[in-house]
């Protein structure tokens, strides 16, 4: 165990902002405990240091003769090369397109595949909306269903692959953002390839926790979920797809020649990155890749497995708590989504924050179809909630609470979270009154009892929708 691990009580690395004190309704300040890694992560210290070192040298990329421009271009292209290596694609003819995030990467691929409504994209009900909505807009979707535990088998995918017409693409998550469950990606990819169906893996959740699979044709992930929150994401895929036709974005930097009636697009990947690129985001992502690979996947995986075991088993053992997803014996990422009998999910999240200084996510987690299945909601119930939302009332929206952990968390953090959840589940009285915003569904302490909240929250900014 390193000195840093010992100081952090079992964490692998500390993040910028760890230990910051936040006000609670009892008048004390507590060290903030972030249990919302699945949504977004703070920066690794090495990432911030790399960014700070780079910023004085920031300049234009690919279009300047000055020393700073040349240095910025080198940093940007080195980040691209690092992303390819991180995805296991340093050999072959794949390219890495640097974009904003996984959502943009998937939309980018959707456009580039030139899909039509008669085309079928096979995906699953486990997906984040980012790996559903772009395909549904461009093509016809076929969905692999899940069981009540939120999982499916390779055989379920094989059955869907065999239906006609044959899918143009299989788009599948590497890990659920709700349950942390990881589909058997290598098996699924092999079955798709045996039927000449290419595969995209949404690796947004997977990338910070496990080595990326090398067999999919396309893979996308985000820096903001892997300790580089500076707005860069990656789409990796074969160069040939991006070598012909017009790119997803049109503009400067993507062309070799423009006349009033003619455009000659440049070669990929620059062809796909019109406009001034996010060099700082690329530098940050490169630093995060270096830091994660420096830790070693065996150490990182072992840390995640232990946290996932403690988190899921700890919550499942609390009377009144219902853990969603697969059995605790199943290997998952360190994420656990749960409900507490008799307490609205939004109130649980608000109380964990205001009374304990613990940050979690609540709501539907940008994966509505999956969550409704995990909750066991029927069509009539979902239709009723839809009508309420259309009336502007989110006060009774279904949902759950998610705790998700990462590289900077420790077993002591799990203990702190479970102790707080145990108190709520046992009926511990709230020290202050809470009020609910009907339009967002969120709860917050009455500002008379918690003046620190006054003016700190934008009206109408809901945690629940997604």
Image (cartoon, rainbow, N blue to C red):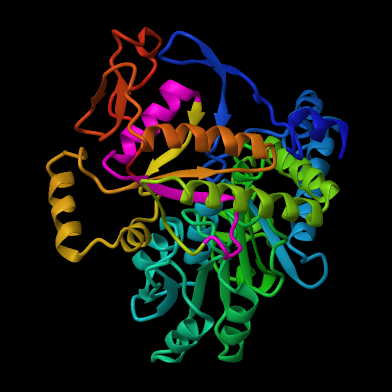
Find residue 347 and report its image quarter.
top left
Vertical placement of residue 22 versus 310, above or below: above
For residue 84, side relative to residue 120 (left or right): right
Q: Is residue 58 visible?
A: no
Vertical placement of residue 246 versus 217, above or below: above
Find residue 145 and report its image quarter.
bottom left
Seen from the viewer's position, the closer of residues 323 and 141 is 323
Q: Is residue 171 visible?
A: yes
Seen from the viewer's position, the closer of residues 32 and 77 is 32
The picture places residue 269, in percent across and down from the top left corner, at 68, 59
Is 310 magenta? The answer is no
Residue at left 64%, top 42%?
277
For residue 441, side relative to residue 238 (left or right): left
The picture places residue 344, in percent across and down from the top left corner, at 28, 39
The picture places residue 56, in percent across and down from the top left corner, at 79, 23
Counting the numbered discs, the total is 0
Vertical placement of residue 11 versus 80, above or below: above
- Residue range of the region highlighted in magenta in the rendering: 328-357
Seen from the viewer's position, the closer of residues 237 and 128 is 128
Residue at left 66%, top 74%?
240
Residue at left 53%, top 51%?
312
The picture places residue 417, in percent across and down from the top left corner, at 52, 35
For residue 211, side relative to residue 159 (left or right): right
Indicate the quadrant containing the N terminus: top left, top right, bottom left or bottom right.
Answer: top right
Is 346 magenta? The answer is yes
Seen from the viewer's position, the closer of residues 295 and 416 is 416
């Amino acid at each position: 165990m390193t000195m840093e691990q010992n100081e952090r009580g079992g964490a692998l690395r500390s993040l910028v902002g760890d230990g910051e004190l936040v006000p609670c309704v009892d008048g004390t300040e507590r060290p903030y405990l972030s249990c919302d890694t699945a949504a977004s992560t703070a920066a690794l210290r090495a990432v911030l240091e790399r960014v700070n070192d780079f910023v004085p040298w920031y300049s234009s990329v690919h279009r300047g003769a000055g020393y700073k421009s040349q240095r910025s271009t080198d940093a940007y292209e080195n980040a691209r090369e690092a992303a390819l290596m991180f995805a296991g694609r340093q050999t072959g003819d794949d390219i890495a397109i640097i974009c904003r995030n996984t959502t943009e990467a998937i939309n980018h691929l959707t456009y580039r595949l030139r899909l039509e409504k008669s085309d079928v994209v096979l995906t699953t009900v486990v997906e984040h909306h980012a790996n559903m909505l772009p395909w549904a807009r461009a093509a016809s979707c076929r969905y692999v269903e899940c069981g009540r535990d939120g999982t499916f088998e390779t055989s379920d995918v094989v059955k869907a692959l065999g239906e006609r017409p044959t899918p143009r693409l299989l788009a599948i998550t590497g890990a659920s953002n709700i349950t942390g469950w990881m589909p058997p990606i290598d098996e699924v990819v092999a079955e798709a390839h045996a039927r000449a169906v290419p595969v995209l893996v949404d690796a947004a959740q997977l990338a910070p926790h496990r080595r990326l699979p090398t067999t999919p044709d396309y893979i996308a992930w985000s820096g903001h979920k892997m300790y580089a929150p500076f707005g860069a994401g990656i789409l990796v895929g074969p160069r040939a797809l991006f070598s012909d036709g017009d790119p997803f974005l049109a503009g400067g930097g993507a062309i070799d020649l423009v006349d009033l009636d003619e455009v000659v697009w440049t070669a990929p990947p620059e062809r796909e990155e019109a406009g001034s690129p996010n060099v700082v985001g690329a530098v940050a992502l490169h630093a995060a890749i270096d830091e994660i690979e420096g830790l070693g996947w065996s150490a990182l995986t072992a840390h995640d497995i232990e946290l996932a075991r403690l988190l899921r088993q700890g919550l499942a053992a609390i009377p009144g708590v219902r853990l969603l997803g697969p059995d605790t014996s199943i290997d998952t990422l360190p994420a656990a989504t749960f409900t507490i009998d008799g307490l609205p999910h939004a109130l649980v999240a608000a109380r964990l924050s205001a009374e304990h200084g613990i940050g979690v996510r609540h709501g539907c987690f940008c994966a509505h179809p999956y969550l409704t299945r995990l909750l066991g909601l029927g069509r009539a119930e979902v239709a009723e909630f839809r009508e309420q939302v259309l009336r502007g009332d989110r006060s009774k929206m279904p949902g759950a609470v998610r705790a998700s952990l990462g590289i900077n968390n420790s077993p002591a953090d799990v203990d702190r979270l479970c102790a707080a959840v145990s108190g709520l589940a046992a009926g511990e009285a709230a020290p202050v009154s809470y009020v609910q915003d009907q339009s967002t569904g969120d709860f917050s302490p009455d500002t008379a009892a918690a003046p620190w909240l006054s003016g700190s929250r934008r009206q109408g900014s809901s945690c629940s929708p997604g």
